[in-house]
Image (spheres, rainbow, N blue to C red):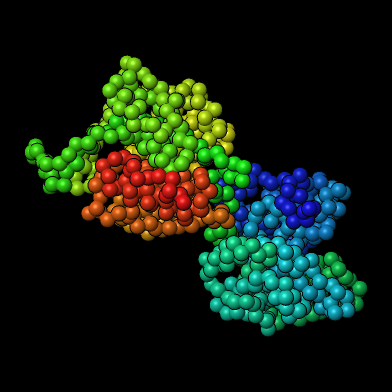
Amino acid sequence: MCSRFFGQKRSFSKFLQISPQVKEALASGEGVVALESTVITHGLPYPHNLSTARSLEQKVRSSGSHPATIALFDGKIHVGLDDEKLELLASSQNAVKVSSRDIAKTLIKKEVGGTTVASTMKIAHAAGISVFATGGIGGVHRGADQTFDVSADLQELSQTPVCVVCSGVKSILDIPKTVEYLETHSVNCIVYGQENVFPSFFTRTSDRKAQFCTESLEEVVHLLKTSKSLGLPYGTILACPIPEKYAADGDAIQKAIDQAVQEAIEQNIASQSVTPFILARVNELTQGASMATNIALLENNASIAGRLAAKLCDRRPLTISQSQPTASTTRKPKVVSIGATIVDFEAITSEDVKDDGGSYNGQVVQRMGGVARNHADALARLGCDSVFISAIGDDNNGHFFRQNSHKIDINRVKIISNKPTCTYLAVNVKGNVKYGIVTCEPLLSVITPSLVESNEDALESSDFILLDSNLSVPVMARVLEIAKKHDKQVWLEPTDIDKVKKVFDTGLVGAVTAASPNANEFLKWAKLCHVSVDPSVIDTADGVLELIEKEKTKLLLNTSIFIVTLANKGSAVVYRNKLGQLEFQSLPPPLQMNKVVSVSGAGDSFNSGVIAGLAHNKTVVESLQIGQECARLTLQTSLAISDAITPNLLA
């Protein structure tokens, strides 16, 4: 079956020239606002057009997003213009007006082209931009019942899901018929203000209404997300009345418009020449007042669009799992865990321990531990092909590891004869680890960048990589370099407050797909991201979520899932849904504290449940539920990973 040529983004790929700044913003999930260029080529005279173009871009930046002015040069569609191209566009004497139908012609003739609302929408959508700011949209022309003169902007709005932030319909047009057309063609139409009165470009009011009005950009975001989740192909208009302090005398401008329209009729000016003629004539008749008003509304719309895009701001793909099973595929998802192998000894008591040198009743248990090893164990129990890269000593503790790793692929674990296997002693009082003592450094020094490189084939063939921050900075850097090279997903477990800094020291923290710090590790993470935090923010999951929502660009970096575990206060989870938009969720504790046997390994079990769920193509919500159940089971045992964790949890 043939696909619609312009309906596919790939149709534009060979012609799109996206600036490095815009490309980086889109890739990192930051807000981007498209800006049209006919206002530069045909709407305003030089040099006002150039200063206005620069001003609009600055308004977008000041609102927290990145501007992407769109124009055509030399057979290419440019999305994002540097100052040299803005100057060329503004000073061009031969620029053509480019609506949707004119894109191909302008490209093959290699003309300088200023884009209209219609073509800017189409190009923005092809580039992955959801918000577009302009002055006013085109519409049904006066006398259209005789001329059939209807702007292509309306057709594009009926078939391209981009939000157009504007001041309504240009007042030189037939506003009632235009609003009726929008309704007939299912275009969302919202007034941004207290009253549901559709603005008419230069003036704040008309005799028409929209679907509804709102003063909340969050409500607009919710509508856009919902429309997208429903698969609706229609555009959205956010009609913004010009601020009162900038509004010129509406009656005077309207009289000038009426006169200019009459002159256009008398001079047989038609089609694309009508709007430039009327705007220029109205500017003459009002002695420049209409141009000042025009620039004011353009700047206002750009500011609002910048804030809206910053709230949407999520263009980065979300899905953690990259493997898609087919009817003929039975391969288990492959997860590679890299980090320390540790044999744990835990002293557990329910008595009131004091710092008095006394002895307390309890039990001492020996079990397998280590963050990466715990993940490898849990992932294997959850039906993954679990590969472990680590090192152990050729001693009793190393033998204990080999005896208790029958579910894990340990063929890549290096055995060292002259160094002891890592050990950890924890003191657990009433379910909480008060402190721990670890002996790891002698053996961890054996895990080197060259060891990672010798196992690159395992990383390249993996669906996911679990990275343990017990490793040295050079080793972590090499893992992240290989993951980036092969476009692999990486889950970072910080493991300790003093080890959070390591991933930042690699210079490759942007290669991390998911991170799971605990409360204190999160405070250190925020500090390293240059975010000032009141320590009380970790008292509740909602407090953490509020901070992340406020500072998301700084804190989340390039992650798709970010989980802050808060012990008995639950967890704060931020993830990108299937639309690539951020979702915020507060999770309760997996188990009541009075039922907890040991917290050791609970966080690793939770992470593994989430990773396994995603690797088996579960939704994020489903995967979080699996993670909660894995944590609950482990909290009820003295083992680092509960024996009750099985593939049945994925059913």
Residue 530 seen: no
Q: Residue at x 79, y 66 (%)?
A: 152
Percent across and percent down for residue 325 are 58, 45
Q: Is residue 566 above or below residue 449?
A: below
Q: Which of the pair 87/115 is nearer the observer?
A: 115
Q: Residue at x 68, y 83 (%)?
A: 207
Q: Residue at x 32, y 16 (%)?
A: 418
Residue 408 seen: yes
Q: Is residue 125 above or below residue 522?
A: below
Q: Is residue 267 above or below residue 432?
A: below
**Drawn side of residue 316 relative to residue 277, left or right:** left
**Drawn side of residue 396 relative to residue 386, left or right:** left
Which quadrant holds residue 366? top left
Pick out the residue farthest to the top.
418
**Drawn side of residue 333 relative to residue 467, left or right:** right
Pick out the residue farthest to the bottom.
207
Percent across and percent down for residue 585 are 43, 58
Count how many numbered circles sit on residues in the image: 0
Percent across and percent down for residue 417 are 34, 16
Q: Which of the pair 254/634 is nearer the observer?
A: 634
Q: Which of the pair 237/243 is nearer the observer?
A: 237
Q: Which of the pair 286/377 is nearer the observer?
A: 377
Percent across and percent down for residue 45 are 77, 61
